[in-house]
Image: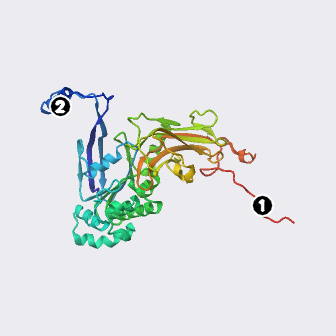
């Protein structure tokens, strides 16, 4: 018999988006007073049809319904802007829904972004007790778990340091340790774990699995890493444009999710108003092209260099700004990650205020035949992501860079095992008499 711990019915969340018009040189006092009067009229007259043309309704979630049983491990996937983070914020009671209702049984511990629930002026020790108190736990109960939390987070030396001086990795380690060990009935984790190193991510996935299996607690996990989703979750919910597309086992949902990649091309552009990013930097374009004509195309020969170009609008930047991308398979498996800061100091490309173009070259003779995706990654080194997108462009490789007749002896649609197919150097070390 099912035991729903979360029930979501016809959930919707609406935001009002403002669009700035071209700025006038000045606004007269009479115009300000007139606008205020219109606002007061609308406030006290519900039937007023006066509308602001600069405002637009945006539904981040619409008619979302599902149930989660006690002990379930639910993965939530979807492209950027699908509504994943909005859903978690509503379930964590950080924001209120516009329509529908949710029923939750038990305490919810959320890890949605770096520093969530921590007071920056308090020490790590004090924040552990503060978070426990927020979850409704007594001091004795928190004290019983204290040593286990500290050991998991690996921050013993910094326990009495204010957390505002922690690195993002230390923040995440401690925040996850607190959320996972203070025994909430429901643990909600967003993509924040991507900030941590690979070994810590693996450690967190193991902990989430154990608290669900051994403790009978429920885990909701949002991630772009479908490999992590598959290894942890029994059920996956695919969100798109604020609506539930499919809820089923990972092996059924994830292939359907990645089939949507067929809809993207080798070039993507955004207007300045809709470009992903923040006040520091925004991403205006991503494209893939070869040396021959500099035109974007979707099919490349493996014997040609391939160029990845990111168009950026830069307002403010620091020396710690990292611009790069993940090269992935259509299934989301990361083949490599490259940043402009991977080079030696004297060769790192410089930023300028305004529009910038950064290019990265994938050498010829590296990639195997197949389809590849580019996922932009922009952030402040070891602090936070500014842009962390799913695949925005894709391209296809035809394998034909081999010079040996044996290399090219494969049948049609030829490729070799593996994701890359470089021609490596061989030599004989046998002594010849």
Q: Position of residue 408 (x, y in %)?
A: 71, 44
Residue 238's place in the image compared with 46, above or below, is below
Residue 168, how many percent across, how many down? Answer: 39, 58
Q: Secondary structure under badge 2?
A: helix
The residue indicated by pointer 2 is 36
Tell me what residue is drawn at x 60 percent, y 45 percent: 362
Which quarter of the picture shows residue 211? Answer: bottom left
* Residue 29 in sight: yes
Depth check: give the residue in front, 29 or 416: 29
- Give the position of the N terminus as an image quadrant: bottom left
Question: In front of the other: label 2 or label 1?
Answer: 2
Residue, far right: 433
Distance from disc 2 to disc 1, alpha carbons, whole Å, reads 85 Å
Q: Where, by quadrant of the figure, is residue 304 drawn?
A: top right
Camera-side residue of 250 and 324:
324
**Crowding near pointer 2: few (<14 within 10 Å), some, many (20+)?**
few
Mark 1 nearby-residue class (10 Å; few <14, some 14–19, many ≥20) = few
The colour mode here is rainbow
423 or 339, nearer to the observer = 339
Quadrant of the image for the C terminus? bottom right
* Number of numbered markers: 2
Note whether residue 339 is visible.
no
Is 273 placed left or right of 329 in the picture?
left
List the single residue furthest toward the left: 44
Residue 397 at what x, y percent from top left? 61, 41
Residue denoted by label 1: 428
Q: Is residue 47 left or right of residue 383?
A: left
Q: Secondary structure at mark 1?
A: loop
State the residue at coordinates (45%, 45%): 390
């Amino acid at each position: 018999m099912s035991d729903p711990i979360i029930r979501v019915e016809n959930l919707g969340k609406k935001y009002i988006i403002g669009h700035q018009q071209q700025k006038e040189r000045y606004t007269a006092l009479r115009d300000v007073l007139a606008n205020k009067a219109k606002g007061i009229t609308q406030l006290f007259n519900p039937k007023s049809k006066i509308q602001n043309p600069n405002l637009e309704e945006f539904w981040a979630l619409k008619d979302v319904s599902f149930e989660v049983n006690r002990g379930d491990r639910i993965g939530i996937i979807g492209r950027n802007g699908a509504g994943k983070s909005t859903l978690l914020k509503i379930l964590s009671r950080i924001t209120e829904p516009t329509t529908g209702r949710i029923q939750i049984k038990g305490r919810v511990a959320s890890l949605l972004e770096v520093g969530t629930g921590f007071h920056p002026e308090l020490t790590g020790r004090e924040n552990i007790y503060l978070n426990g108190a927020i979850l409704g736990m007594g001091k004795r109960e928190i004290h019983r778990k204290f040593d286990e939390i500290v050991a998991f987070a690996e921050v013993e030396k910094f326990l009495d340091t204010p957390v505002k001086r922690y690195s993002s990795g230390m923040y995440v380690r401690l925040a996850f340790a607190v959320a996972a060990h203070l025994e909430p009935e429901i643990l909600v984790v967003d993509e924040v774990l991507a900030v941590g190193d690979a070994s810590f991510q693996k450690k967190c996935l193991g902990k989430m699995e154990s608290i669900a299996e051994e403790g009978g607690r429920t885990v909701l996990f949002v991630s772009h890493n479908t490999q992590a989703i598959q290894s942890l979750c029994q059920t996956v919910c695919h969100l798109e444009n604020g609506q539930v597309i499919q809820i089923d086992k990972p092996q059924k949902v994830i292939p359907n999710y990645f089939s949507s990649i067929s809809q993207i091309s080798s070039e993507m552009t955004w207007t300045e108003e809709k470009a992903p990013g923040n006040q520091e930097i925004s991403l205006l374009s991503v494209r893939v092209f070869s040396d021959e004509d500099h035109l974007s195309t979707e099919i490349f020969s493996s014997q040609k260099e391939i160029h990845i170009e990111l168009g950026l609008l830069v307002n403010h930047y620091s020396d710690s700004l990292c611009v790069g991308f993940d090269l992935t398979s259509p299934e989301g498996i990361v083949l490599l990650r490259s940043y402009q800061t991977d080079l030696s100091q004297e060769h790192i490309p410089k930023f300028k205020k305004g529009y910038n173009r950064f290019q990265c070259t994938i050498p010829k003779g590296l990639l195997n035949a197949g389809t590849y995706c580019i996922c932009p990654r922009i952030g402040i080194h070891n602090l936070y992501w500014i842009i962390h997108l799913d695949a925005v462009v894709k391209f296809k490789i035809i394998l034909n860079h081999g010079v040996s007749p044996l290399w090219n002896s494969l049948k049609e649609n030829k490729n070799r095992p593996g994701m890359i197919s470089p021609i490596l150097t061989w030599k004989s070390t046998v002594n010849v008499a």
